[in-house]
Image (cartoon, rainbow, N blue to C red):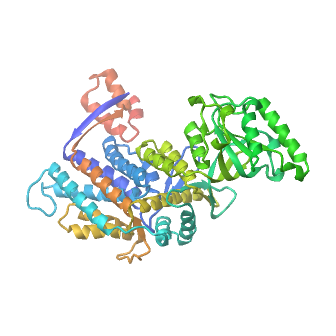
Amino acid sequence: MFRKIQEAGPETQKKFLKGVEVVDKLVGDTLGPGGRNRLVQVKYKAPLVINDGATIARHIVLEDPIEDMAAQNIIALSMQTAEQAGDGTTTSVVMAAELVRSGHEALKDGVIIGSKDKKNPMSLFKEIQADKDKAISILNELADELTDSRLDEVISTSLENLEYGKTLGELFRKVGKDGYISVEENWATKKGIDTETVTGMRFLGKYASPYLVTTANKKEALWENAHILVTNQRLDSFDQLDPLVKEVMKSNNRKLVIFGGYSEGEAAFGKALIARVSAHMRAYYEMPIEQQVNVGQILLVQVPSLTTPELEDVACFCDAKLFDKNLNMKVKDAKIEDLGHALKVSVTDSDVNVIGGRGNSAERIQVLKDQAELEKDAMFKEKILRRIASLASGVGIIRVGASTDAERSYLKYKLEDAVLAVKAAWEEGIVPGGGLAYSQIADKLGEGSVLYSMLKAPHERIKQNLGVDSLDIPDTVIDPAKVVRIAIQNACSGAGMLLTSDGAIAEVKLTYMDYLEKAIGKAIPRDMRDDFRDSENQDQGAGRFID
C-alpha cells in the first residue's frame, strides 16, 4: 500500500536541488576526455562499465520521492536530448544542473542575476526563455557546414580516438548522407573494430530450395544481370508463371528472379512450384555448358520478413512493378516490361543482397524521409531510416570486438553516439568542441545573462574532470551544431520547470510503523510512538519494541 505526501516551500526546493546534484555528480563527471566511468548493475549479468550519460541517467533512482522527482526531471531532458540529437546528453545535464543552482541563488533574495529589480520565479523563467532564443541565434552564426575533410574530426571528438575516427570517416564517405550505419558486436574479434560496406539492398530471406544454389561451398545462389519479379501473393503452380517465363525465354537475358513475401501466413511458394523449379534447375546444371545458354533459369526467393511497403522498396530499387494481391493484380498477367533488373542478386539461407538496381529511387526516398520525420516511435523510425539507406545504395556495418563483455558494451555505446553525432553534424553544421561553442555564446550574451554560468559550465566541467586549470582545445575538436542547440533548449526547459516549482505531491510505500499505527490507532502514547520511530530509523526499533 501507498500513502501520499505533500510538501511545499523552501525545504521542498532544497530537496529538488539535492536530487539534481546527485544526477549532476553521477552523469557530469563522465564529461570529456577526463571523464570517469560508472558501473551500472544489470540483473543476472555482469555490470555495465560505461560513461554514456543517457545510459547512466536511465538507471538513476533516488530513495526520497521528492528528490527523485527532481532527478527524473533532469534525466527526462537528457533522454530527450539523446532522442533528438543522439549526443549531448551529459552536457545537457551539466548545464541544467548549473542553471538550477544559479537560479536558486538568484531567487534567494528575489533578485535576478545582473538586475537590481525584484522578480519572482516566473519572471526568471521568461528571462531564461528570452536568453535561450538569443543563444540559438548566436549559435546559428557560429556554425559551419560539415565537409568530408572534417568528417573524421567529428567522429574522433565523439569517440576520443583518432584512429577509429579515420576508419569510420572512410565508411561514412562511402555510404553518404542517406546511408545507414549499423553497430554490431563482434564476438570473434578480441580487440578493435572492423567495417563493411553493403552496396544495394540487404534484407532477410533465403532461396526456396537447395537445388537453386550456384556456389555449393558457400551455399549461395549468385545471379548476374537478371530480370526481377516482386509479388506478395502466393504462387502455387508453374501455370501462374508459364506465360511470363515464355516471354523471358524469348529475350536475350533468360534469368528470372522472383521475390515472394508471405501471404496471410502462408509460404510464398507452394510445394508443387518449388518441386517443378528445382527439377528444372537441377537439369540445367547437369547440361553441357553450350546447351545452358538456350535454357531459362528461375530463382525463387522467399522474403517473409518484408512487409508490402518494403516489397515496394525492392520493386522501386529494381524498377519493377509490385504485383500486389490487395490490388487484385495477378502474376499470370505479368509482362516482361513489368519486370525490374539488377546487376547482381546474391541469396544465402539467411539473407539477400540486391546490387545495381535499375530503378530511380529519389522520389521514394523523399517520401520515406517525410515519414521518418513524422514517426514518433524510435524503433519504427530506425526501420524507415534503414529502408532509406538501402534505396540510396549505402549500408555500412561496424563490428566492435573487445577482450571482455564490459569493454565491448562500452565501445558499442561510444560508437553509436559517434554515428549519431555525424548525422547531426550533416544536418546543421559544426561548431568548436570541448565546450568552446557554449563559452563563445556565453561571452556574446554577456555576464549579465541568466544563462552565462550555465553556458560556461561544460568547458569548466571538462577542465575539472581533467584536473587542470586551463585547457587548450585544438581546432580539430568539433561538435555538431544540432547537438549544441538541442542541449541548450532542453537544459533551459528542464531547469526552468524546476525553478518555477516549489511544491510536490508523491506516493511512498507504507512502512512497518504506518501499518502498526493504522492497526492500533491511538492505543500507544505519542511519546512511545515517537521513540519507536526514532529507533526504527536505526533499523533496530522493531525488535526492541516487540521485546
Is 114 left, or right, of 237 in this rendering?
A: left
What is the x, y in percent for residue 527? 25, 32
Residue 30 appears in the picture as rendered: no
What is the x, y in percent for residue 334? 66, 36
Nearer to us in this view, 473 or 407: 473
What is the x, y in percent for residue 80? 38, 49
Residue visible at 32% across and 23% down in the picture: 518
How many marks are shown on the rendered structure? Answer: 0
The residue furthest front is 250
Is 385 left, or right, of 452 in this rendering?
A: right
Quarter containing the N terminus:
top left
Is 327 left, or right, of 248 in this rendering?
A: left
Residue visible at 86% across and 42% down in the picture: 282
Residue visible at 25% across and 64% down in the picture: 453
The residue furthest left is 117
What is the x, y in percent for residue 238? 77, 32
User: Is residue 101 shown above or below 542?
Assistant: below
Quarter containing the C terminus:
top left
Residue 251 appears in the picture as rendered: yes
Nearer to us in this view, 334 or 90: 334
Nearer to us in this view, 237 or 267: 237
